[in-house]
Image: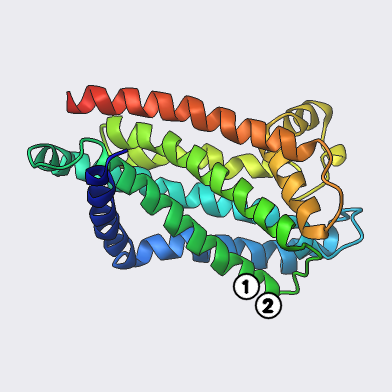
């Protein structure tokens, strides 16, 4: 990785972050929407749900809300990539003496920064709603590490439709199943309350192990195998998505 690449990526990262800061709908979708869902689940449905965890419902469902926050945020990564492709930004930078992949990496890092800011906002609101944690420094670092891996994995998935979609709606529509996936997991109710077919799916999809690992880390409890399963899911998705996204990128700019 050359100094030229780092300098170009830093400049383009600043450009993308300025676009994010000037886009109110991005802030609303990535931070306000998950907060609204959290308020609804805690204050409308929370009293009727038995989590069998012995803790408050906001403690139980916060990990799922954090994953929905990331899934909502990466839709805008695909949207911004699509707009740059249609606007000829990639071709323009390719004609200049800039590092070949710096535009793409700037979008990926913008997604990471924007999503981490949104996650901090959601956690602060959860604290105001009564969220409490027994997590120490190592547990917090582990939670941050899992969320960073999860964000990067979904971001590289978002790169594929962002580069290849034919319409703006197509570029961002891929995120809907990702936003819906936590509802078929242990994010909001225990999986043993679900019908057999749904329960089998819920217990063997990546969101459940990620949610369980983060929930145990926040509670200061032993995590068990869930953290290794969660890391394996995130790393596996990240590698596959990165390879597919880079192949798509090379085809588009060749």
| Outermost left residue | 95
The residue lying at 55 percent from left, 69 percent from top is 121
Question: Dot 2 lies on which element?
Answer: helix
Q: Total number of numbered labels?
A: 2
Q: As rendered, which of 130 and 142 lies closer to the eye?
A: 142
Query: In the rendered view of the protein, which quadrant contains the C terminus?
Result: top left
Q: Position of residue 239 (x, y in %)?
A: 50, 28
Q: Position of residue 132 (x, y in %)?
A: 78, 70
Disc 2 target residue: 128
Q: Label 2 neighbourhood size at 10 Å, few (<14), some (14-19), many (20+)?
A: few
Query: Looking at the image, which is closer to me, 242 or 63?
Result: 242
Instruction: Locate residue 66, reporting x and y percent.
Output: 61, 55
Q: Which residue shows up at 84% across the image and 60% down it?
A: 48
**Residue 99's image quarter?**
top left
Residue that badge 1 annotates: 125
Circle 2/circle 1 CB separation < 8 Å: yes
Q: Is residue 151 left or right of residue 19?
A: right
**Vertical comparison of 194 with 59: above or below:** above
Q: What x and y, as percent, mark residue 214? A: 72, 50
Cα–Cα span, label 2 and label 1: 5 Å
């Amino acid at each position: 990785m050359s100094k030229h690449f780092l300098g170009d990526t830093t400049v383009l990262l600043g450009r993308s972050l300025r676009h994010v800061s000037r886009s109110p709908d991005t802030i609303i979708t990535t931070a306000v929407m998950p907060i609204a869902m959290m308020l609804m689940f805690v204050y409308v449905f929370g009293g009727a749900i038995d989590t069998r965890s012995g803790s408050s419902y906001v403690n139980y469902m916060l990990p799922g809300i954090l994953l929905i926050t990331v899934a909502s945020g990466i839709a805008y990564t695909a949207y911004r990539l699509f707009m740059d492709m249609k606007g000829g930004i990639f071709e323009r930078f390719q004609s200049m003496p800039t590092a070949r992949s710096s535009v793409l990496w700037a979008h990926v890092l913008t997604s990471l920064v924007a999503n981490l800011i949104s996650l901090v906002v959601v956690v602060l609101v959860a604290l105001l709603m009564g969220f409490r944690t027994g997590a120490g420094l190592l547990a917090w670092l582990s939670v941050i590490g899992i969320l960073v891996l999860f964000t990067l994995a979904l971001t590289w998935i978002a790169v594929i439709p962002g580069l290849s979609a034919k319409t703006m709606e197509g570029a961002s529509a891929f995120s809907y199943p990702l936003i819906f996936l936590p509802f078929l997991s242990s994010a909001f109710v225990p999986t043993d309350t679900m019908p057999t077919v749904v329960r089998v799916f819920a217990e063997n999809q990546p969101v459940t192990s990620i949610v369980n690992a983060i929930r145990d880390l926040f509670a200061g409890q032993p995590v068990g195998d869930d953290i290794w399963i969660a890391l394996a899911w995130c790393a596996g998705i990240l590698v596959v998505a990165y390879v597919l996204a880079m192949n798509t990128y090379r085809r588009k700019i060749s």
